[in-house]
Amino acid sequence: MNTLSPKHRRVAIATVAILLAFIPCLAQKNPKFSDYPVRQKFTGKPARVDLASAKGAKYYRTRLREAAREGANFAGHYAIGVWGCGSPCLMAGMVDLKSGKVTWVPSPEMMVFDVAFNVNSKLLIINSHDVLNKKSPNGPPNWIGGVWPPEIYLRWNGRSFVEIKKK
């Protein structure tokens, strides 16, 4: 025997439908470095940094050359260099150690506080909350509204960075 009125039945069905729609959101997880592995790490002599391969690379030649000298630190055979561009801004460039080609790491319009990456992974995280919370255990400063900017997940596909949406 059904004790709900037609109106209450519609409300109950709508409520269940809304809750079911949000279940995938609850299951979302952040991408991890291990989700985007690389097969091997470059150990040879780095190619000469090709400053003509990216617009403006000549202005950051010292930082790019230092990154290449330090060796692979991203996606097996790339060297990412990170430097300040005014508080709290960061800028990053990447050198392919096999070819010397320079690629700029995307810099979203919002402030970039941190860039996290790993030699064994094609994943790059802009504004990694794990890293930011370790650097600032008291949390984000009030001058940015007391909230860290959103994390941005990017996957290197060998030619460009592609944004990864949370699963």
Image (spheres, rainbow, N blue to C red):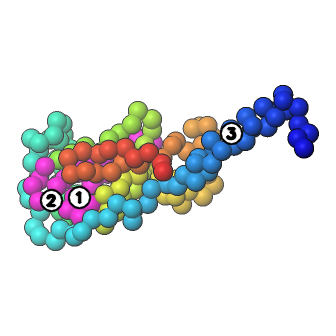
Say which amino acid is labelled 2. Answer: Leu
Which residue is painted at 40% across and 47% down in the image? 164
Residue 136 appears at what percent x and percent y?
56, 55
> Alpha carbon of mark 1 to alpha carbon of mark 3: how far?
48 Å
Relative horizontal placement of residue 69, taking residue 132 as reference (left or right): left
- Tags 1 and 3 in contact by the CB under 8 Å rule? no
- Closer to the camera in the image, 31 or 87: 31
- Tags 1 and 2 in contact by the CB under 8 Å rule? yes
Relative horizontal placement of residue 65, taking residue 114 as reference (left or right): left
Residue behind mark 1: 79
Determine crowd level at label 1: few under 14, some 14-19, many 20+ residues with C-alpha closer than 10 A. many
Which residue is painted at 15% across and 59% down in the image? 97
Residue behind mark 2: 97
Residue 50 appears at what percent x and percent y?
9, 48
- Closer to the camera in the image, 1 or 153: 1
Say which amino acid is labelled 3. Answer: Ala
As drawn, 25 above or below 109: below
Q: Range of the magenta residues? A: 74-101
Residue behind mark 3: 17
